[in-house]
Amino acid sequence: MKRIGLGRLASGTLVWIYGLLLALPIYFLLTSSLKENMEIFQEPFALPTEWLFSNYAEAWERAVMLKALANSIFVSASAEIITLALVIPASYGLARSRSKLALFLERVFALGFLIPAFATLVPVLLLSIQLGLFQTREFLTLFMVASTLPLSVILLTQFMRTIPAELEESAMVDGLSRLRIMWHIYLPLSLPGVSMIVILNFLAYWNEFLFSLVLVGSNADNRTIQVALPTLIDQTKTEFGPLLAGTVITLIPVYLLYIVLNRRLEGALTAGAIKG
Amino acid sequence: MKIRAKARSKSVGPVGATRGLSLFSLPALAWFGFFTIGPLLAMFYISTLKWRSLIGKSEPAGLANYEKLFGSDVFYASLANTAFQLGFMIPIMIPLAFMVGYYITLKPRGHRVLRVVLFTPGLISISATAMVFYASLGPQGLVNGLLDSIGLEDLTKPWLASQDTALLMIVLIGLWQGIGYTAVLFAARLESVNRDLYEAAKLDGASEWRIMWRIAFPISLDFVGTLTMLQFLWTLFGSAGLILLLTRGGPGLSTTTLSLLVYQKAFFENDLGYSQAAGVVLFAIGLVGMLVIRTLVKARY
């Protein structure tokens, strides 16, 4: 195409303006995290005159971030493990069974994906009290597993369906049990699908805020990183440097993941919405 | 669905041989039932109780909570705010995201950088987003600094603390975060469209604009429907976290949306029955909205 149409020029300009609008607050976040309040207020766009890395140290101390990071890692990692233990057999079963029941169950998961977790906030809190698990990281973990189950099952089922059924049939002729087939044949072949849901769920677990706040609370021993962060706001006088430094700290794990797994992560997130 | 059906018919062997395999999904199903379906049903039950404390006792109250809900000003205010939020956000987000997504698939110069930038807000948590905008929209934040530097001091204001702009800011933050991510999703879908269609139309003299709306858009209409539905649900149910961190529903009632009301009544005012009655209404709106969007898309499909 030689001729660049007016429409394309206009849409290109608009898209780049939007891109700038996206980038500007991120630039502001990064530069301000190294400044003092006065400098943030007076020179919001300038680079810091003096790079105050002490803001990071202060955020780290004041929000007890080490503990919060450990809690977030504990919660995310345990939720990942439990989720896989539930999803892999479920998806294998649904992908290979051709009974009406399996079809129905798959529908249930597809509908379940549409239930917004928020609708269950108060009853889930009451459930945690009933079970004597209020304000524990363990209950948050168990709940978060449930919130990501439907999409994970749908995605992995679709993935496992692309594995030829003949493989399974010849394995059955060899006398392998279903469980062994799942473990030794299906799991290795569906690792790309598994890694996709692991990435997708990591983002969900790491970034979860409202349920973490309600179920675990803001006690410094148990709270996750997302709940620890807003405690840097001071009702009378907020120090914006440390607040934004703390924000950057919470983003680091996610962006590290993005840098390492760029295409994969994009693939996981888009598959999450397209196939779900 | 079509792809799924095809894959199903491809496998060989009698149905009976695979009987029992569905049982493999029972643990997952039970887990989901216990932590999601059960609580969802409990919401309906709790909405008929008088329950004034998380650790206290409850007693049956019939439909009293609903009477209280429908008789309270805060409910109608939150309904209006939710309507504003949805009515402003969805009609802007979906077309813009579609255009941006279409633009990326043309692979213009710098499209890789653009993709990364557009993707960025999708990775940021609610609390991090809230902190960035708490700093940006404050009295001495980024936006006012920008206005100052271009000589528009008169327009500066505490954006989140002003009755007439707070809700607008919540909506704009939603758009800031949502357009880019939705655009990347559209792009992923549009990449599977056969290019020859565009080329043929171009030979016939169709402009890029016409190709985008007359060819690419109708082809992906079912996906437009899906994303509209998802954004509708996310906006309707998901706004409580951000609002809680930025404005707590204020100033006045100006940012009290229906989902925030559910939170507020339960956790600030300890009125669980009322909160869950609002939750039932929220759920009903979600259900009706989804059906309406589905019908609209199907009718034009």
Image (spheres, coloured by chain):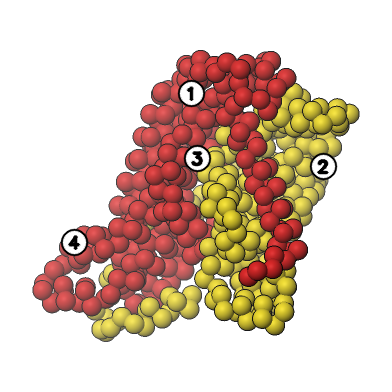
Vertical relation: B209 (above or below) B81: below
Spatial CA distance of label 4 from label 1 is 44 Å
- Hue of chain A? red
Which residue was labeled with disc 3?
A207
Identified by mark 1, the residue type is Asn
- Residue B125 vs residue B296, the one in the foreground: B125
Label 4 element class: helix
> Residue A1 at what x, y percent from top left?
63, 70
- Hue of chain B? yellow
Which residue was labeled with disc 1?
A219
Disc sitting over residue B154 in the figure: none
Q: Chain of mark 2?
A: B
Identified by mark 3, the residue type is Asn
Q: Do the residues at pointers 4 and 3 share their chain?
A: yes
Q: Nearer the viewer, mark 1 or mark 2?
A: 1
Spatial CA distance of label 4 from label 2 is 61 Å
Q: Do the residues at pointers 4 and 1 share their chain?
A: yes
Instruction: Say left or right for B21 vs B39.
Output: left
